[in-house]
Amino acid sequence: MDWLGNVVFKDREIENERLELTDKNANYILGPNLMLKNCTLVLKVASRRLSIDRARFVECSFEVKQELKNYQDWIGASLKGCRFKGPFSGCDFGHWPEYSSLPWCQLGALEDCDFTEARLAGCRFHGCDINTLRFPRWPCFTFLDPIGRARELRSVKWPGSFGEVVVDNLHTHPASTKALTYYAPSAAERFETTPEELRAVIEKFDCIAY
């Protein structure tokens, strides 16, 4: 459905299709009451052009061709057995009911998903079993149970301002946060260090996947 520049997918089930969400002048709305199975979604739009509202994705692939920045609508999606490719920054996935009392925010779920081909920078995973997820390898690195392990992670000296800005504040993330992933090159640039210096400390911990 195309209405006033909005491309809306709702109240239907779509299976084995490829959806190209690439028109920079369109607003794409996925949901409510949308089920996608074994579909490939190609995303090449700004975050403000994409809305997910109580949609379910099963065994789907998301191919991000333009960095998806500061996108929280994933928490309005139920994602099972999905694969993610491309660059994401400041995104939140999973079940984070405290984010909002709105209905779309209450149905988020994340299970058996594969992020190994994604580049994640400052992305969080909420209210999920992280043992069912596959995280990207180095130069990405993932804090597992960052709140529970915060004290341990603060026990060593981190390079640049990474310790002061990131590690010292792990305990301030929402209680639902189960994992937190950074991309070493961008983190190193932002926090005045190098990927090599970060890795030297990361290797000391079994609660960091890389």
Image: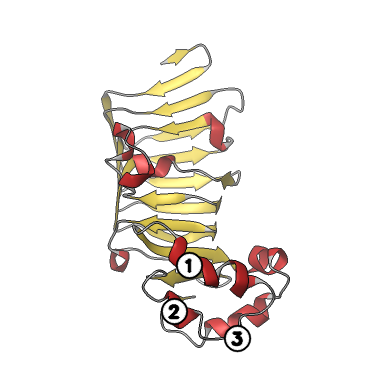
Please give the residue where the numbered disc 1 appears in the rendered image: 170
Going by the numbered disc 1, the residue's amino acid type is Leu
The residue lying furthest to the top in this view is: 4
Q: Which sits earlier in the primary sequence, circle 2 or circle 1?
A: 2
Please give the residue where the numbered disc 2 appears in the rendered image: 151
Reply above or below: 111 against 15. below
Please give the residue where the numbered disc 3 appears in the rendered image: 200
Decide if residue 16 is on the left or right side of residue 120: left
Reply above or below: 115 against 15. below
Q: Nearer the viewer, residue 22 or 160?
A: 160
Alpha-carbon distance for marks 2 and 1? 9 Å
- Residue 66 spot, x, y in % from top left: 61, 43
- Residue 207 spot, x, y in % from top left: 41, 79
Front label number (3 vs 2): 2
Reply above or below: 14 against 99. above
Alpha-carbon distance for marks 3 and 2? 19 Å
Going by the numbered disc 2, the residue's amino acid type is Arg
